[in-house]
Every structure is written in structure tokens, then in C-alpha cells.
Image (tube, rainbow, N blue to C red):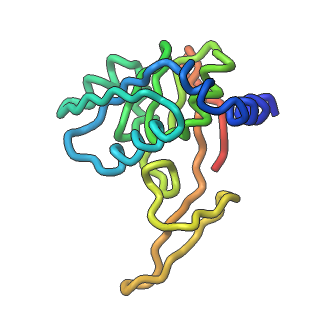
């Protein structure tokens, strides 16, 4: 409930609140179109994004202390937290507002429907699984996933469900 209120207040505050956001450092492989789309999602939501392309994402993840079982493709660092995977900009804003004692947020893997991983519009707002018909039958374009808060002891709590 508190996170929803914080997100609503941030949305109402508009561009002035966006100017107060710290920059986010995003690390991604050299060729990752979904990662590029995710950074654009962050920019459209008021973040200043600094991108570093690297061929050694394993070293980045070790440096940021991302647990192996929570890894995705892009990794980021903001205000002392890591952001692993295609995390929604609003959830990063909530993290910055609440400042929990944690290592960061993670969306493990590459779930369809996450920012930068949208395959088609419109997307379902209720986290449903939606199937498209294509020449090979049906393919999923959105799947259920969770954003996890990674605590300092390595345990996780659900931060949001999609």
C-alpha cells in the first residue's frame, strides 16, 4: 500500500521529482536490443542513464554482489543498490523513496512483458498470460513474474507482482 502511495505521489509530482533522481549506471552486453529498450524505459521515466557495454557481465554481477540464481542480462547500480534485470522504473523509484536495508531489486531471467521485453501491444495489466497466434501456432507475449527485493543476507521478498 505504501509503495502504491509513493508511486502515485511521484507521478503527480511530475518532472520536478525526476530531476531529483540519482543517475543509474547500466551494464549490458555489447548487443542486447532488449537492454537498450529497458534503458529507454528508464529515460522516459525521468532517469539519467549511463550505459557501459561489456563482454564480461559475470565480473559486473560479482562486483555488484548479484546472487547467481537471480541473474538476468542487464545489471545496474543506483544509490548503493543493484538493479538486476528488467525492473520497472516505478519500482526503482519506490526503492529510492523507501530506502530499505537491502542489496537491491531483481527480475531474474527475461520474462516477457517486462520493460524492454514487451513483444506486442496492448499488454495485459492483470499479469495474465496472453497467447498470440502466429504461423507456428501460439506464442506467449506476456507472462507472470515478480520483482524481488534482495536483502543483505541474500534472502528475497516479493517487491511487486506482474
Residue under the point 55% across and 36% down: 89
The reply, left or right, for residue 100 in relation to residue 1 is left
Res 124 → quadrant? bottom right
Nearest the viewer among 58 and 120 is 120
The reply, left or right, for residue 147 in relation to residue 82 is right
Res 10 → quadrant? top right
Res 26 → quadrant? top left
Q: Position of residue 2 (x, y in %)?
A: 79, 28
Q: Position of residue 19 (x, y in %)?
A: 54, 22
**Residue, far right:** 1
* Location of the N terminus (image quadrant): top right
Q: Position of residue 121 (x, y in %)?
A: 53, 67
| Residue 63 seen in this snapshot | yes
Residue under the point 53% across and 23% down: 104
Q: Position of residue 51 (x, y in %)?
A: 30, 30
The correct choice, above or below, for 64 with respect to 139 in the image is: above
Residue under the point 68% across and 36% down: 11
Residue under the point 43% across and 45% down: 109
Question: What number of labels is visible?
Answer: 0
Nearest the viewer among 154 and 150 is 150
| Residue 158 seen in this snapshot | no
The correct choice, above or below, for 92 with respect to 81 in the image is: below
The reply, left or right, for residue 96 in relation to residue 139 is right
Amino acid at each position: 500500500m505504501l509503495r502504491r502511495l509513493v508511486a502515485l505521489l511521484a507521478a503527480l509530482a511530475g518532472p520536478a521529482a525526476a530531476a531529483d533522481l540519482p543517475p543509474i549506471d547500466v551494464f549490458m552486453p555489447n548487443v542486447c536490443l532488449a537492454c537498450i529498450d529497458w534503458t529507454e524505459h528508464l529515460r522516459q521515466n525521468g532517469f539519467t542513464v549511463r550505459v557501459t557495454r561489456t563482454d564480461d557481465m559475470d565480473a559486473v554481477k560479482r562486483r555488484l554482489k548479484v546472487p547467481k540464481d537471480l541473474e538476468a542480462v542487464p545489471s545496474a547500480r543506483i544509490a548503493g543498490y543493484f538493479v538486476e534485470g528488467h525492473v520497472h522504473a516505478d519500482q526503482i523509484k519506490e526503492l529510492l523513496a523507501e530506502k530499505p536495508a537491502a542489496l537491491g531489486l531483481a527480475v531474474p531471467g527475461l520474462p516477457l512483458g517486462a520493460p524492454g521485453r514487451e513483444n506486442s501491444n496492448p499488454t495485459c495489466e492483470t499479469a495474465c498470460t496472453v497467447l498470440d497466434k502466429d504461423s507456428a501456432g501460439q506464442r506467449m507475449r506476456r507472462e507472470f513474474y515478480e520483482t524481488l527485493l534482495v536483502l543483505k543476507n541474500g534472502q528475497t521478498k516479493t517487491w511487486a507482482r506482474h
